[in-house]
Structure formats: C-alpha cells, structure tokens
Amino acid sequence: MNTDITSYFCADCDQNFPITITRYCCDCGQPLLLTTSQTPLIPEQIAQRAPTLWRYWEALPLADPTRIISLGEGMTPLVGDQLDSCQHWFKLDYIFPTGSYKDRGASVLLSKAYELGIDRVIEDSSGNAGAAIAAYSARANIDCIIYCPEKTSAGKLAQILSYGAKLELIPGNRNQTTQAVLSATNSIFYASHNWNPFFLSGVQTMAFEIVEQLDWSAPDAVVCPVGFGGIYLSLYLGFQKLYLQGLIKKLPRLLGVQSESCCPIFRSLANNQREITPMPVEAETLAEGIIAEQPIRSRMIKDVILKTEGAFTTVTEDEIRSGLDVLAKKGIFVEPTSAVVVSGLEHFSNRGIVQPNDLVISILTGSGLKSTETLKKIVGY
Ligand SMILES: [Zn+2]
C-alpha cells in the first residue's frame, strides 16, 4: 500500500498542502506537484503483473488498490522504424480505450477521485482529455462536466457525450475555455489534465513502459508533441524516478515539437528569454491538440529542458500533412497532432541533436479515428 504520498507541494515556494477537493493550485498561483513516493519499483515484481499501467503501482498515488478505476489501459506497443538518421522506435500511445494517451492520466486521476469519495468532476479540454475524463468518470460512476472550445472535432464531442458527460461548448479559443471553467472550480473537483498532478502521475507511466520495453534501459532521446507540456513533464517525472533509483544510467534528452502557429516554448528558447511568455495563435493549425498559448507549468518546462539537455522545434502545416502521409504509409493512422513528430525528428537530426547511433523514441498520442472529418479532406475524399 502506498502510504507515503499524502500531499501537494509547490516547487516554487516550497509549501505543502493536504489533498482537498477544491485546491488545484498553490496560494502563490503556481500549479502543484505531488510529494514523491519513495517506494522503489522492482523489475522482477513488475514482470509478474498484468500488462496495464497499474503494474507500476508503487509509483502511483493511490492508497487503496480496491479503488482502481481501470479499462486495462497501458503497455502500448513499441514498434521499430527504418531510418538512417537514428535507431528509431514509435511508441503507439494512441492504442488506448478512448483512443489517446490521455487514458493514462484519466485512470489515475479518477481512481484518486473515487478514493477521495468525490461525486462530481469538471475539466476543460481540446477534446482528447475530455473524452478520457468522461470515460473514466462513467466507469467510476462519477458525474462529469467537460468544457470544450466550440471548434473541437465532432468525433471527440460525440465521444464525450456518449460517455454521458455534460458538455459545455465555449466560443473563442482554447484559453477562453480554460477561463470559463475556472469559475466553476470553487466547488467542484477540477480534473484538469494540466493543473491536476494526479494526471501527470498517470502519464509518467509512459516513461516506465519505454524503459521496461527496452529491457530496463533508457533511450538516448524521446520526441513528443508539446502544447501545455503534459507528456514532456510526465516523461521527466518518470525517467527521473528510475534514474534516482538507479534503474537507468542517464536521463534521455527530451525533444519537444510545437506547431509553428502556436509555439511559445520554442520561441522563448530561440529568443533566450528567461520566462516563457504567452503567444496568441497566429493561424489555424491541424495540430489542435497542442494549441497552448500559455503553458501553465512553464517554469518547470524550462527546468526540465535544462536538466535533460532538451530541445524544441516547430513544424509547418505542410510538414504535419507530410508527417501524416509518412506514418500512414507505414501502417500508422494517427490524428494530425501526433504527426508533428515526423518532421520534428528530421529537424533534430539536421541540427545534430539526434545522432545516427542514438536510440530514439517518438510518441504517437491520438488515433486518426478522432479526426476523420479533417483527415478526409487531407486525403482528398
Ligand atoms: Zn507556491
């Protein structure tokens, strides 16, 4: 039983807080993390367990295993790819019950909500996280309200409604959706995939799986799409735990890919800014899942870039389309947001950040079946 995770803490001002229904950020306004579990992960024990993310139980913030809300999620395929630029593998993290990696966070977050006796949650999302939170809320028999931008893909909205969640469509951009939801968090548990640290805790299992699938060794680099930075930060939390425990010998370089239309992290690095400043969306982008004008955990993102010798790049709309085509010709059907990693990896190779002998993993985050309306136009149907 995990009894050593009992509180929220703020990395900015070192304050600790008990876990309560309405607290989602520090008094200083910064997002919270969880105090880290000291219980080690033991590979021989893990090997005996079912192939779900709950096999890493010791690292997950739940006290009571009877409270687990699961749809058998996790242990997604790691498949090889033929490239000259590096030894490359795809992590097919869209192979999940709701069609995106967000089930990792949703399973852990809703399990915690269930353990805390919470009967209603609220979330804002560009679609995939909303679908995941709605699905696991249904599984836990917890009422769920999801706020989405009105331009969200029809398939994602239908999915959210099918799970029985209440849907609120908000005019304007992604940021306005977040502003709309915050006023409701005074009385309802905010199941946010960006603010809620239980969500990050679930997504860190992506790092555990990669390392276990590589026979308990670390890759040289991981390439992932970045909007708010949930995957980027969660990978760090996961790899860092394994590194501190001595299970891996190094931290992989974490390489983030943003859409050229909205790339505040890339831009702040390129301009040598100390802080990541907000960047309004400059044009419509196919990569709807990584629109984040102001990543809320921007200080932690800067810190992780430093600690992992991380790097960022951006891709154009044409590059997203060609990424979709490259993946589909390899038998991989993903939503446009996921396809940013293809050209992203090329950029990192061209810049010498990825070398021919490097072992590199690219994360594929959402199924193409999420975006059939958009993809239909791209293939000219
Ligand atoms: Zn604080």
Image (tube, grey):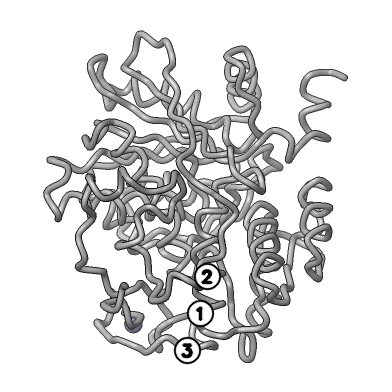
For image coordinates 65% across by 43% down, the residue present is: 99
> Residue 11: which quarter of the image?
bottom left
Considering only order in the chain, which callout, 1 or 3, is on the residue closer to the N terminus?
3
Q: Position of residue 325 (x, y in %)?
A: 64, 17
> Ligand 1 near label 3 (Cβ, under 8 Å)?
no
The amino acid marked with disc number 3 is: Thr
- Nearest to the observer: residue 200 or residue 185: 200
Instruction: Tell me, for residue 68, which label it has, or none.
Output: none
Question: Mark 3: which secondary structure?
Answer: loop
Residue depth check, mark 3 versus mark 1: number of the one nearer the observer: 1
- Residue at disc 2, secondary structure: helix
Q: Is residue 334 left or right of residue 158?
A: left
Quarter, ligand 1: bottom left
Q: Marks 2 and 1, Cα distance to the nearest angstrom?
A: 6 Å
- State the residue position of label 2: 111
Asked whether the viewer can see residue 267, the reply is no
**Mark 3 residue crowding within 10 angstroms, few (<14) / some (14–19) / many (20+):** few
Q: Where is residue 355 in the image (x, y as percent from the top left)?
A: 25, 19
Outermost front residue: 48
Q: Residues within 10 Å of mark 2 (few under 14, many from 20)?
A: many
Q: Identify residue type, mark 1.
A: Glu
Against 351, is 67 above or below? below
In the displayed structure, would residue 337 be above or below residue 344?
below
Residue located 68% across and 76% down the image: 142
Establish whether ligand 1 lies closer than 8 Å to the Cβ of label 1.
Answer: no
Q: Position of residue 188 (x, y in %)?
A: 64, 85
- Whether the residues at callouts 2 and 1 have beta carbons within 8 Å, the answer is yes
Characterize the local packing of mark 1: few (<14), some (14-19) or many (20 or more) Cα atoms within 10 angstroms. Answer: some
- Residue that badge 3 annotates: 20
Tell me the residue that label 1 is attached to. 115
* Residue shown at the point (35%, 38%) measured from the top left: 210
